[in-house]
Image: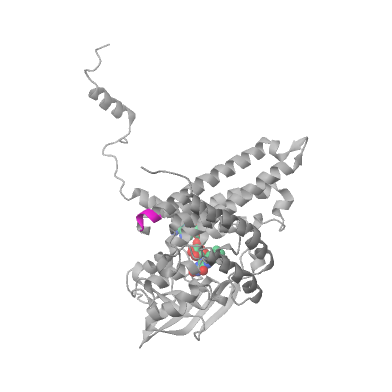
């Protein structure tokens, strides 16, 4: 039997290198660039590309990908340990070539793209020469994708797309978008939509505006509200089978959700580390904040939440590697996704409180991390939906108690035990 919580020494050396590299090289870049994803930005390229080269040389590039796609195939557990460190920065995932939504979009292209689409988009996407957008959410329907109305109709050897999409992150500098559209309106609710690759320069794509996110002021507005007007794309830009849009979407979402959680561990740890430093620095009465029991409680509660969450993330990552089938870890991923926003909100919120006015100011990052918790509770499915999914999995094989009382009803258990041991002890 093997059961351990230690990182093998060789990989630990890589992690130590990453930790130092993030502090010394990536964090300073975060302070002087706008959006690390914006490959059009010369200043960003001058700073980020040399760092990406160092990551490649260290053989840590695109760790989420298997060797067939140019990654080392480390699996999710090693990726989790790496992502914890990248998660405390904005640019980190881009410097290591594992940034969302490109990572998930690459998975979709790798699974469902034609050889021509792979050559045109997948290879440069993996190399971060281009970036991509995922265009699924609509203004009138986010959580319920069966409410989507954007249409794709076959016209000869082209699909023609019409409709509106909302919050298509990074679309304004993406080279292509992966778009979900209704192709079969009369099919059952889960087989109405299909998924497409839409080149960003296709005529008819109107960027209505870029929507901003509270807490992301420093990186600008990058979530596109898009109208598709008679956007014509070749028939082979359909990804997967017609009507299989939901199944194709799942290809990216399983990994995407756990990757967000891995990075969130990093933000939560950073919040706690900063609280600890503040507690021993800030004078209070004759001592410091660290002497106050309610402050100690804040630290203890934060540590417990962080470690519980981290173990859940690592165990889920381990299961993904072990089973190699996301369907077997649906419950685990939903649990991780549902736990994530609360842990970040609680710990970053305590960090705000402990730092007082400084904590709420824009001179520390906690305010944006508090908002980030809401981002984590919405993107890739609202928390409520993941709790519903988890509960469904728990209830899937549940059977009602055969009688009036629960099967663990103590009087019945005692009666069974007494009859099992009857005759063992003499009559008292
Ligand atoms: C920063 C950010 C980036 C994003 N990037 C992308 C992207 O690149 N591409 C993309 O397509 N989308 C993107 N999204 C959109 C995201 O996927 C949606 O926000 C999400 O699916 C929720 O949809 P909605 O915002 O329309 O909320 P709604 O569907 O209106 O839901 C609002 C709230 O209603 C409640 N609710 C909804 N349904 C239920 C239910 N069944 N049971 C109980 N409560 C429920 C929940 O509290 C939920 O949070 C992004 C979102 C954010 C915040």
Label total for image: 0
Q: Position of residue 86 (x, y in %)?
A: 57, 59
Q: Which of 41/291 is in front?
A: 41
The answer to whether 334 appears left or right of 156 in the picture is: right
Q: Which of 227/35 is in front?
A: 35
Q: Position of residue 311 (x, y in %)?
A: 48, 47
Q: Position of residue 158 (x, y in %)?
A: 39, 86
Residue 329 in view in this figure: no
In this rendering, the answer to whether 115 lies above or below 347 is below
* Magenta residues, dominant SS class: helix
Q: Quadrant of the C terminus?
A: top left
Q: Start and end of the magenta stretch?
A: 320-324
Q: Does the magenta-highlighted stretch encompass residue 170?
A: no
Instruction: Give the farthest residue toward the right.
Output: 286
In this rendering, the answer to whether 423 lies above or below 274 is above
Instruction: Give the farthest residue toward the bottom.
Output: 156
């Amino acid at each position: 039997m093997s059961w351990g919580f230690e990182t093998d020494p060789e990989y630990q050396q890589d992690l130590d290198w990453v930790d130092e590299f993030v502090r010394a090289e990536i964090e300073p870049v975060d302070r002087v660039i706008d959006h690390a994803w914006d490959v059009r930005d010369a200043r960003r390229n001058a700073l980020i590309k040399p760092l990406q080269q160092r990551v490649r040389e260290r053989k840590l590039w695109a760790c989420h990908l298997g060797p067939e796609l140019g990654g080392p195939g480390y699996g999710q557990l090693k990726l989790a340990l790496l992502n914890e460190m990248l998660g405390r920065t904005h640019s980190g995932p881009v410097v290591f070539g594992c940034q969302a939504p490109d990572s998930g979009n690459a998975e979709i292209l790798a699974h469902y793209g034609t050889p021509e689409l792979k050559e045109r988009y997948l290879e440069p996407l993996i190399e971060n020469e281009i970036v991509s957008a995922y265009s699924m959410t609509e203004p009138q329907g986010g959580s319920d994708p069966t409410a989507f109305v954007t249409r794709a109709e076959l016209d000869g050897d082209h699909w023609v797309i019409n409709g509106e999409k909302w919050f298509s992150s990074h679309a304004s500098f993406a080279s292509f978008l992966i778009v979900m559209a209704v192709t079969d309106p009369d099919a059952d609710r889960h087989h109405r939509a299909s998924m497409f690759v839409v080149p960003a320069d296709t005529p008819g794509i109107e960027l209505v505006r870029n929507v901003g996110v509270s807490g992301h002021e420093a990186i600008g507005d990058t979530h596109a509200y898009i109208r598709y007007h008679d956007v014509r794309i070749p028939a082979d830009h359909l990804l997967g089978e017609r009507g299989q849009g939901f199944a194709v979407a799942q290809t990216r979402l399983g990994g995407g959700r756990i990757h967000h959680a891995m990075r969130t561990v990093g933000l939560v740890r950073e919040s706690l580390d900063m609280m600890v430093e503040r507690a021993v620095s800030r004078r209070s009465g004759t001592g410091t904040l660290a002497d106050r029991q309610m402050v100690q409680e804040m630290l203890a509660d934060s540590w417990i939440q962080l470690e519980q969450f981290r173990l859940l993330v690592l165990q889920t990552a381990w299961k993904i590697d072990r089973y190699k089938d996301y369907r077997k870890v649906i419950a685990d991923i939903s649990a991780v996704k549902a736990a994530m926003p609360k842990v970040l909100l609680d710990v970053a919120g305590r960090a705000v409180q402990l730092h007082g006015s400084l904590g709420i100011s824009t001179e520390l990052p906690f305010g944006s991390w508090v908002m980030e918790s809401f981002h984590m509770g919405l993107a890739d499915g609202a928390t409520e939906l993941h709790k519903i999914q988890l509960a469904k999995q728990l209830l899937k094989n549940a059977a009602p108690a055969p009688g009036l009382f629960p099967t663990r009803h103590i009087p019945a258990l005692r009666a069974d035990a007494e009859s099992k041991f009857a005759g063992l002890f003499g009559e008292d």
